[in-house]
Image: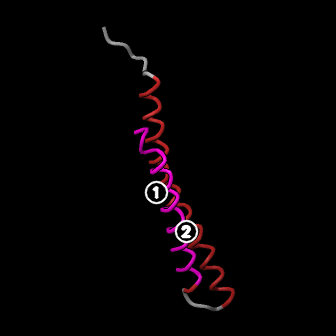
Amino acid sequence: MFTTHKTYEDRKMYSAILMLSAWGFVIVISSFLFLYAGYHLDKLLGTAPNFMLGLFFLALFFCIGRLYQEAWLKRKDV
């Protein structure tokens, strides 16, 4: 007979996968937020795309770094 109840291990695995997939949204939102802030800093200071590109790549670097760190900690669970 089939049971519809998930075991604790299954839920833990799905939770880890869901958390790691949510990082995609974090990367996109933070990249656009930093891109927007950089655009306004450039407009205020008159420095073409310097702050816009710098903050964009800074956001990408830190988000991907945190994603890698989170995945490294979760590698045993999945």
Kindly report the secondary structure that dominates the magenta region of the rendered protein.
Answer: helix
Residue 58: x, y in percent?
Answer: 55, 72
Per the image, is 64 magenta? yes
Q: Is residue 38 above or below residue 64?
A: below
Please identify the residue farthest to the left as the structure is shown: 1
Residue occupied by mark 2: 59
Please identify the residue farthest to the top as the structure is shown: 1
The answer to which of 68 and 43 lies nearer the viewer is 68
Q: Amino acid at mark 1?
A: Tyr
Q: Quadrant of the N terminus?
A: top left
Question: Mark 2: few, some, or many residues within 10 Å (few <14, many ≥20)?
Answer: many
Instruction: Please provide the residue range marked out in magenta.
Output: 51-78
The answer to which of 62 and 21 lies nearer the viewer is 62
Please identify the residue farthest to the right as the structure is shown: 44
Q: Given this view, does label 1 or label 2 mark the residue nearer the observer? A: 1
Please, what secondary structure does the residue beneath circle 2 have?
Answer: helix
Residue occupied by mark 1: 68
Q: Residue at x 50, y 68 (%)?
A: 60
Q: Residue at x 46, y 47 (%)?
A: 20
In the image, 54: left or right of 21? right
Q: How is the image coloured?
A: secondary structure
Q: Give the number of the disc on residue 32.
A: none
Q: Is residue 77 above or below residue 1?
A: below
**N-term-proximal mark, 1 vs 2:** 2
The answer to which of 49 and 65 lies nearer the viewer is 65
Residue 76: x, y in percent?
Answer: 42, 41
In the image, 23: left or right of 78? right
Q: Residue at x 59, y 82 (%)?
A: 51
